[in-house]
């Protein structure tokens, strides 16, 4: 019976050791990847538009929804929302816009002139537009995922590698005393992809390397912390004087 807990602890240590030996890939993505809600909505809107005529109420609702999501996505790319105050202001503006839309639908007599003009606006598009919109994004995403193969960082248990260029140029830095800082400057970017900024400062290198828009940055930082922590303990063990 005593062997079971011992074997369980040994298995856990083995799993932890295997995890530390796995390389950690750090990739900086362009901000266009944050437009994936608009991309997926364009495909869904194209399917719905295929089922209903352009003059129907459903087509109008799909058009308004697409415009709202696209606008919000563009705002996320155009501005940073680093603090709670800016985030609150953003939600207030969104709530105000949605409130005006609801009032124009259910109580048009409150502001007849304004709502009469707003009621005439009926954005809609056919399925071809939505599918072409999504297709353009799909082509761009394909190029993005191909190009990132030629510029990425790889953290191993004993060294930091920078792969870049079409000819696979490689820079090596020691992982000992490596400093990595995590920064989350935009709340919405973090909500969409868990994105943030990593600042890498290798040993004996004057300049720091900045990686913007690294997805799932919190989990990456946790793995980096465990890897570098294990490396520091390992170095101390090796340099300790023998009795």
Image (spheres, helix red, strand yellow):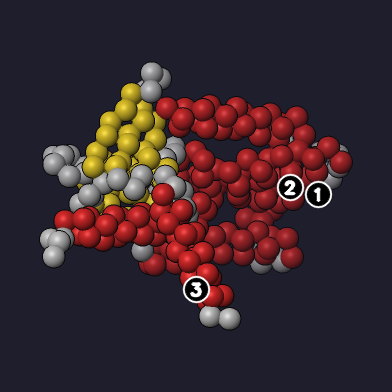
Q: What's the CA distance linking mark 3 and mark 1?
A: 63 Å
| Badge nearest the viewer, 2 or 3 | 3
Against 5, residue 32 (above or below) is above
For marks 2 and 3, the one nearer the N-term is 3
The residue at which mark 3 appears reads as 6
Against 232, residue 7 (above or below) is below
| Image quadrant where residue 204 sits | top left
Q: What's the CA distance linking mark 2 and mark 1?
A: 6 Å
- Is disc 2 in contact with disc 1, using a CB cutoff of under 8 Å? yes
Q: What's the CA distance linking mark 2 and mark 3?
A: 60 Å
The one nearer the camera, 187 or 106, is: 187
The residue at which mark 2 appears reads as 62
Q: What x and y, as percent, mark residue 71?
A: 55, 47
SS at mark 3 in the image: helix
The one nearer the camera, 70 or 226, is: 226
Q: Residue at x 48, y 66 (%)?
A: 10
The one nearer the camera, 185 or 14, is: 14
Q: Residue at x 63, y 40 (%)?
A: 39
Q: What x and y, as percent, mark residue 129?
A: 71, 31
- Is disc 3 in contact with disc 1, using a CB cutoff of under 8 Å? no
Q: Is residue 86 visible?
A: yes
Tag on residue 58?
1
**How many C-alpha atoms fall within 10 Å of the one at disc 3: few (<14), some, or many (≥20)?**
few
Location of the N terminus (image quadrant): bottom right
Q: Is residue 140 left or right of residue 235?
A: right
Q: Is residue 54 left or right of residue 148?
A: right
**How many C-alpha atoms fall within 10 Å of the one at disc 1: few (<14), some, or many (≥20)?**
some
Against 76, residue 229 (above or below) is below
Location of the C terminus (image quadrant): bottom left
Tag on residue 2?
none
The number of discs equals 3
């Amino acid at each position: 019976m005593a062997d079971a807990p011992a074997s369980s602890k040994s298995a856990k240590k083995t799993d932890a050791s295997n995890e530390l030996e796995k390389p950690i890939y750090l990739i900086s993505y362009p901000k266009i990847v944050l437009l994936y809600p608009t991309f997926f909505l364009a495909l869904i809107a194209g399917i719905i538009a295929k089922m209903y005529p352009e003059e129907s109420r459903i087509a109008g609702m799909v058009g308004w929804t697409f415009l709202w999501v696209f606008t919000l996505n563009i705002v996320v790319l155009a501005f940073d929302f680093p603090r709670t105050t800016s985030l609150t202001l953003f939600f207030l503006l969104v709530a105000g816009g949605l409130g005006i839309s609801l009032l124009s639908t259910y109580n048009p007599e409150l502001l007849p002139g304004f709502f009469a003009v707003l009621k005439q606006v009926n954005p809609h598009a056919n399925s071809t537009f939505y599918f072409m919109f999504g297709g353009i994004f799909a082509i761009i995403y394909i190029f993005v995922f191909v190009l990132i193969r030629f510029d990425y960082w790889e953290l191993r248990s004993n060294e930091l590698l920078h792969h870049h260029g079409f000819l696979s140029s490689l820079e090596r830095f020691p992982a000992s005393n490596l400093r990595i800082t995590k920064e989350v400057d935009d709340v919405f970017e973090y909500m969409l992809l868990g994105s943030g900024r990593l600042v890498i400062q290798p040993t004996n290198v004057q300049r720091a390397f900045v990686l913007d828009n690294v997805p799932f940055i919190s989990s990456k930082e946790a793995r980096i912390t465990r890897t570098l922590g294990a490396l520091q303990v390992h170095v101390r063990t090796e340099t300790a004087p023998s009795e």
